[in-house]
Image: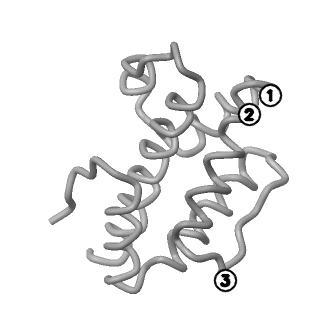
Amino acid sequence: MLKNYEHIEELLIDATKEQLYEKLIAQLNKDFTLANIEESFSQELKPDELKTELHEIVYRLIQEKFAEYLNLLYIMDVSEAKIKALDGSDMLQLSENVVLLMLKREWQKVWFKNKL
């Protein structure tokens, strides 16, 4: 059963426990490539490093390349309603919340591919 994660760390711990962490990184890389964003994540990244790097990238995209950010959300199939429901008053907090939504969606894809 897929959990509804409240924290990025919890999701990454489960991905590691289920030995699907590398596939999660691969899914992120695939969707970044499809969105024409020239960032990628090494399979060697530790979960806390992935969280930090992804957060920095999303923060930069929101600030500097908003169209690319929206395209990435579309490619990943992150819920538009959930994005709109986020509080945008603090850009750092907003980008962290967006990262959680992205990882939840990517995890959902990886989990289903490997469980069904």
Q: Is residue 37 left or right of residue 97?
A: right
Q: Residue furthest left?
A: 1
Residue at numbered disc 3: 44
Whichever of callouts 3 and 2 sits on the residue coming sooner in the sequence is: 3
Evaluate if marks 1 and 2 touch, with contact meaning CB atoms under 8 Å apart. yes
Q: Secondary structure at mark 2?
A: helix
Give the side of residue 2 with respect to residue 36, left or right.
left
Q: For numbered disc 3, what is the local secondary structure?
A: loop
Quadrant for residue 64, please give it.
top right
Name the residue located 43 percent from the left edge and 79 percent from the top edge: 20
Query: What's the amino acid at mark 2?
Result: Leu
Kindly identify the residue that appears in the image at 57 percent across and 35 percent down: 74
Circle on res. 65: 1
Front residue of 81/5: it is 5
Seen from the viewer's position, the closer of residues 107 and 49 is 49
Residue at left 75%, top 55%? 33
Q: Mark 2 — residue?
A: 61
